[in-house]
Image (cartoon, rainbow, N blue to C red):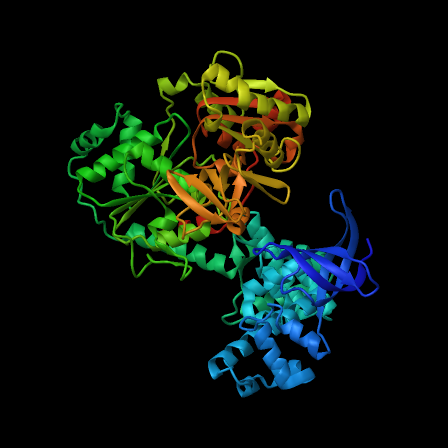
Amino acid sequence: MQQQMTEAIVGRVVFRNQDNAYTVAQMFPDHGGVFTAVGTLPEVYQDMRLRLEGQWTTHARYGQQFKVKTYEIVPPDTEDGIETYLGSGLIEEVGPVTARLIVEAFGDDTLRVLDEEPERLKEIAGIGPKRASAIAESWRAHRRISKLMMFLTGHGVSTGLSLKIHRVYGPEALAVVLMNPYRLTEIHGVGFQKADQVARAMGFARDDAQRVQAGVLHVLQEQVSDGHVYTLKVELLDLAVRLLGVAKELVEEAIDVLATANHQREHVYVEDVAGERVVYPMPYHDAETRLAERVRLLMTSGSSLKPVEDWESLLSRAARGVSVELSPEQRQAVQVAVANKVAVLTGGPGTGKTTVTQAVIGALEALGCTYALCAPTGRAAKRLSEITGRPAQTIHRLLRFSPEKENFSHHELDPLPADFVVVDEPSMLDLKLADRLLGAVDLPAHVLFVGDVDQLPSVGAGNVLRDLIASGRIPVAHLTEVFRQAADSGIIVNAHRINQGDSPICNDGFGDFFLFSADGPEDAAERVVDVVANRIPRKFGISPDDIQVLAPMYRGPCGVDALNERLQEALNPPSPRKAEKKVGQRVLRVGDRVMQTVNDYDKDVFNGDVGQIVGIDPKGKKVVVQMDGRWLLYDWREATEQLVHANAISIHKSQGGEYPAIVIPVLRQHYVMLQRNLLYTAITRARRLVVLVGSRQAIAIAVKNAKVQDRRSGLAMRLASKL
């Protein structure tokens, strides 16, 4: 739709969201009348003249409005106008009285004086040097923002995004964009296409070297987002040529420049891996080579543990804290774990990984060793603490991440004070975090990775657990025996059946594994809600608060987003007694189950932590969430950016957690995500009950799709060559 222009004076700011500057303003155009403007309008106050670009729309409740895409403040050219402009609240330190003093001193030359000779403010009686300096700085800040807004909005960037760019780069924002507009891709929400749009509008040619280099880095980042640590050079060339529409020779040249740049923040490394020429983003090449070298150093350094002279005696002492007798396979696994500097303990559900982990801890305590237990997420760390009866932490917390320094306190020069480190759920461990963790392990210490190699890989790039095993150089204790008690569980039996390529046994012989057939996504969504709200609580006595819906996808009628809307309506409907506030299409309401989506070190909460909204203040500026017995205060912007509804979550988000009951929609419409390891991971999250909702055909598709995405990584090769 074609954009329209209009010019008007702000009559009154009816509403403004202080977090994102969304504004509703009453406007008076020159031709008479009044209209309402809505949009992101920072730095806009009463009596200002604005030049607006946008569209006329009709709101169902409020009638005709002008939806602002971009705007420009039209500077006043009369003394009265300048006085009103300065005294509007736009400039800190300047109110109506001070504005009058300034205009009386400089007249219609006031704006030029503020721009070019701000030191003259000291000439005004009643304005001392300190206050004059503060006014001058505030004016400069306002002008910087105005110039940035005018420049970016003039090049197709929305006002809201312009404001975000200013928040990230501060006073240097305009200089950064002018020097290299492709740096905008560093900002969350600004992709290469948007940065390229700005750059092309600024006059950057299609074959400009900065554009081609930025395109190469963008393709590499896309590959990292897909889990790859490096990209085949031939594939990188092809993808970059298609993205940029330039000759392959220019892309080759850009790669060469990026590979030879000295101390450039975003350069690449080119080498041969497994006989093919590949390109790494430099941070990932550094992390991979460092990690491989650190593993080598750990495995070849002396041990901080006392030599074990009588394994039988130690194993007997270790087993005292375990509720069942260790099998021969488990006893051997304990010995592998304790005896080796770096080791892996893996196995499917019901094979006793928990039992072996408890016995390893018993052995360490018998040896008088210090140890640390950790996991990649808060949920996984909490579960590790519950099953061991010992304190466990997230890896970030263990390494003492400092938000101020954006770095870890523990590293090679200040290693962890532990003789032994147990890392649970390492399938969730990406390359960069693994590098930082092992870099902080003291060389005489031991490291044990405990996890299921058949689970989904990490969200971040790399496949660390699989690479450690695939190297053939790391001692691995692989538990295979499923114990009798576990063999009576449909959850355990079906998890192993799925992992072996067989369809699960549903509704026949097991009291903890069921399939509810559904004809299409809408029917499945209705059944999911009915199962969670009615059937499971009525038949099994499990509260809806203990039931977790795990969906393969976010979008669609039976995706995470739509299911959360339905479940909120069924489990926590609106009520005059429950405060709520709308954000976009979502409503946050007291009583909602919510999940933290980013690490917040100030609040000591982490990605994946789940809690419940227990309070929203009447003005909607604060949200109180209860997590793990703690009450956490979020301002509204934090709440909208960090919290999502969590009655339904993605299967990836469920990793590291356990739930009394899970409900999983499995539909042919989910075919893109129907993979064996996805279904396997989901099922193994349940303790008491699994309910599938969908079709046997969709389940069969998932079970037969055993293709695990080949994550390109050189870690296994480097480990094999070093050890």
Where residue 102 sits: x, y (%)? 60, 81
Question: In the picture provided, is 416 more to the left or to the right than 537?
Answer: left
Question: In the picture provided, is 193 more to the left or to the right than 564?
Answer: right
Q: Nearer the viewer, residue 452 or 115?
A: 115
Q: Is residue 66 above or below residue 455?
A: below
In this rendering, the count of numbered labels is 0
Question: In the picture provided, is 594 more to the left or to the right than 353?
Answer: right
Residue closest to the far right = 31
Where residue 372 sits: x, y (%)? 29, 45
Q: Is residue 160 above or below residue 93?
A: above
Query: Is residue 722 at least partly visible in the picture?
Result: no
Q: State which quadrant residue 318 falls in.
A: top left
Q: Is residue 710 above or below residue 714?
A: above
Query: Is residue 30 at least partly visible in the picture?
Result: yes
Residue at horizontal 45 percent and vertical 27 percent from the top = 546
Residue closest to the far top = 509
Where residue 367 sits: x, y (%)? 18, 40
Q: Nearer the viewer, residue 470 or 653?
A: 653
Q: State which quadrant residue 168 falls in.
A: bottom right
Where residue 269 sits: x, y (%)? 52, 62
Q: Nearer the viewer, residue 4 or 504?
A: 4
Residue at horizontal 59 percent and vertical 60 percent from the top = 164
